[in-house]
Amino acid sequence: MPPLEEQQPLLPNRSLDYDEEETAYEPTEKVRVIGVAVDDWAKTPPFSWKKLWLFTGPGLLMSIAFLDPGNLEGDLQAGAVAGDSLLWLLLWATAMGLLVQLLAARLGVATGRHLAELCRDEYPKWAGLVLWAMAELALIGADIQEVIGSAIAIKILSNGVVPLWAGVVITACDCFVFLFLENYGVRKLEAFFAVLIATMGLSFAWMFGETKPSGLDLFLGILIPKLSSKTIRQAVGVVGCIIMPHNVFLHSALVQSREIDRNKIGHVREALNYYTIDSTVALAISFIINLFVTTYLQRRFMVLI
């Protein structure tokens, strides 16, 4: 058994004036992870499929930002204008996004705090306010296109019966519905979004199969970088849709939903390993769906032209 001084958390305890109620998840809301007890505080417990299942979920919620209407619009533009030539950029942008999200997850697991809490505690008050304002502006800029795009889609699907303003109201209400679902437990919210992602994936996979794309063209588009003056705007759109600043804050908070003993380094490493698998699989699925959309729309526009 190591000395007590060796079993300290990675960050010192919060100050007494810290508001303990301002946490991402209450202790009763966290998913309890039970596994094989390990006496050595620094030893990582053995891999368990059951534990992996319990840790699976935050990556799915995070990956929604890679599959939102803005991404689909970016895929549409990239497929219609650039064809398969920007698939390599989609791959590397997703890989870069995965790296950022893994860093956010490691931050949340290792410290027990999410990024917003750390910015508030570690920076001066004026710097925290500036970061908060920047995050709010980035979030508003990202959400405007989602809300307006959803309103336009609802108007088109309803043959103009639902006006734009009503579509905006419906879209706003959706957000409160999702927040309400969290009251039934974080696992149910994760399951709900998993169903949505699965539905989206199967739908676009079916459409992708109908286009009968060339495997060689896809392979070359993913491996060989190509960029021209005609596709530079679409390239910027692809990268901009993948890298979401608010998603970094979100992911560092989502990993707080599992109960982890941060006094044991082995348990922290174990959680990081499972979250790495969770995030990697989730973003791999998002990349495949975005590839389906880009390829399908490219083939459709080629037929129309």
Image (cartoon, rainbow, N blue to C red):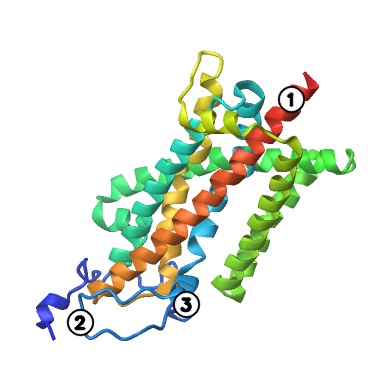
Q: Amino acid at mark 3?
A: Lys
Specify whether 223 is left or right of 104.
right
Specify whether 62 is left or right of 161.
left
Closest to the observer, 71 or 149:
71
Q: Amino acid at mark 1?
A: Phe
Q: Position of residue 299 (x, y in %)?
A: 71, 29
| Residue at image mark 1 | 301
Under circle 2, the secondary element is loop
Q: Amino acid at mark 2?
A: Asp
Specify whether 288 is left or right of 226.
right
Residue 160: name its quadrant: top right
Under circle 3, the secondary element is helix
What residue sits 41% from the left and 83% below the top? 34
Q: Position of residue 118 (x, y in %)?
A: 30, 57
What residue sits 42% from the left and 65% below the top? 255
- Report if residue 219 is visible in the image: yes
Marks 1/3: CA–CA distance:
45 Å
Cβ–Cβ under 8 Å for marks 3 and 2: no
Closest to the observer, 167 or 294:
294
Q: How many marks?
A: 3
Of mark 3 and mark 2, the one earlier in the sequence is 2
Q: Which quadrant is home to the N terminus? A: bottom left
- Say above or below: 161 vs 36: above
Say which mark, if any, is on residue 50: 3
Under circle 1, the secondary element is helix
Of mark 1 and mark 3, the one earlier in the sequence is 3
Of mark 2 and mark 1, the one earlier in the sequence is 2
Q: Position of residue 283 (x, y in %)?
A: 50, 50
Q: Which quadrant is home to the C terminus? A: top right
| Residue at image mark 2 | 40
